[in-house]
């Protein structure tokens, strides 16, 4: 049976969230006329993420890297689908996401793209975050969230940019440049969006990232001038080791 879309999910100890992510993909697959495979890349998992994923129809890939780009690339390397879609394990997609992605790529006008992001709940600081994201995406055109493109396009640019932070923006730039060479645009879904998890805000407060920017201003400035040691520790704390707590 031909696989049309491969959905790649990087996951590090996501037993609390992986099923709802998978449920959202399966609901989108029901609206999509082609065939979809789901690949969960279990990254250093010590919980039940893998078994829950398998019970819900996903294929498991094991990975030990501490770099989200390498984790995603490990999944892409094993994918059977012509089209690659990536989503994080604590997020969800809306019901016609796969259908819209397939239609845009089939049109031949687009190299790939991202999706609009909407939080699963809102407060004043989360609205501020939302507005900043929308402005940033609108100004740059580098939409992220869920990435989608043909597998051959990801292969051509070497997969996700192999850096520890901002790999999404770097990858969007690479896809956009690659598309321009081939007369295609990098775009964003019009009718569907990513439902973005608020779990870190639930745990640490809705002003979380504003506080982090103020608290770590020195670290961020040093990183801008090439000293990445402090930013690496911050990234480990907020992303790579967050689910170990």
Image (cartoon, rainbow, N blue to C red):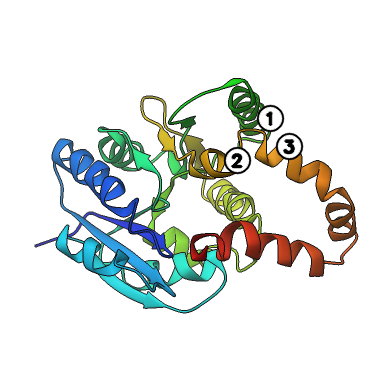
Task: From the image, tell me which residue sits under label 1.
Answer: 139
- Of the two numbered discs 3 and 2 in the rendering, the one whose residue sits closer to the viewer: 3
Secondary structure at numbered mark 3:
helix
**Furthest residue to the top?**
124
Residue at position x 76%, y 61% in the image: 231
Whole-percent x and y of residue 155?
Answer: 45, 67
Task: From the image, tell me which residue sits under label 3.
Answer: 210
Q: Are marks 2 and 1 in contact (CB under 8 Å)?
A: no
**3D distance between C-alphas at marks 3 and 2:** 22 Å
Q: Judge left or right: residue 114 versus residue 215.
A: left
Q: Which mark is residue 142?
A: 2
Secondary structure at numbered mark 1:
helix
* Number of marks in the rendered image: 3
Whole-percent x and y of residue 195?
Answer: 41, 35
Q: Quadrant of residue 24?
A: top left
Q: Which mark is residue 87?
A: none
């Amino acid at each position: 049976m031909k696989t049309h879309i491969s959905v790649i999910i990087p996951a590090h100890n996501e037993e609390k969230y992986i099923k709802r992510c998978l449920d959202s993909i399966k609901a989108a697959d029901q609206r999509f006329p082609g065939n979809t495979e789901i690949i969960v890349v279990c990254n250093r998992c010590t919980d039940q993420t893998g078994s829950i994923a398998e019970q819900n129809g996903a294929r498991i890939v094991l990975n030990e890297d501490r770099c989200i780009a390498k984790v995603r690339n490990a999944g892409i390397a094993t994918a059977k689908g012509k089209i690659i879609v990536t989503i994080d394990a604590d997020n969800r997609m809306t019901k016609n996401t796969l259908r819209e992605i397939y239609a845009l790529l089939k049109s031949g006008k687009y190299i790939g793209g991202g999706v609009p992001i909407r939080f699963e709940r809102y407060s004043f600081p989360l609205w501020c975050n939302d507005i900043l994201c929308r402005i940033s995406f609108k100004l740059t055109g580098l939409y992220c969230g869920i990435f989608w493109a043909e597998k051959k396009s990801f292969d051509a640019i070497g997969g996700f940019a192999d850096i520890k932070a901002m790999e999404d923006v770097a990858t969007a730039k690479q896809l956009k440049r690659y598309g321009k060479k081939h007369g295609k645009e990098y775009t964003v879904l019009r009718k569907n969006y990513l439902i973005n998890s608020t779990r870190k805000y639930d745990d640490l407060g809705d002003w979380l990232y504003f506080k982090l920017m103020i608290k770590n201003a020195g670290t961020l400035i040093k990183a801008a001038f090439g000293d990445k040691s402090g930013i690496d520790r911050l990234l480990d704390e907020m992303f790579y080791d967050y689910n170990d707590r």
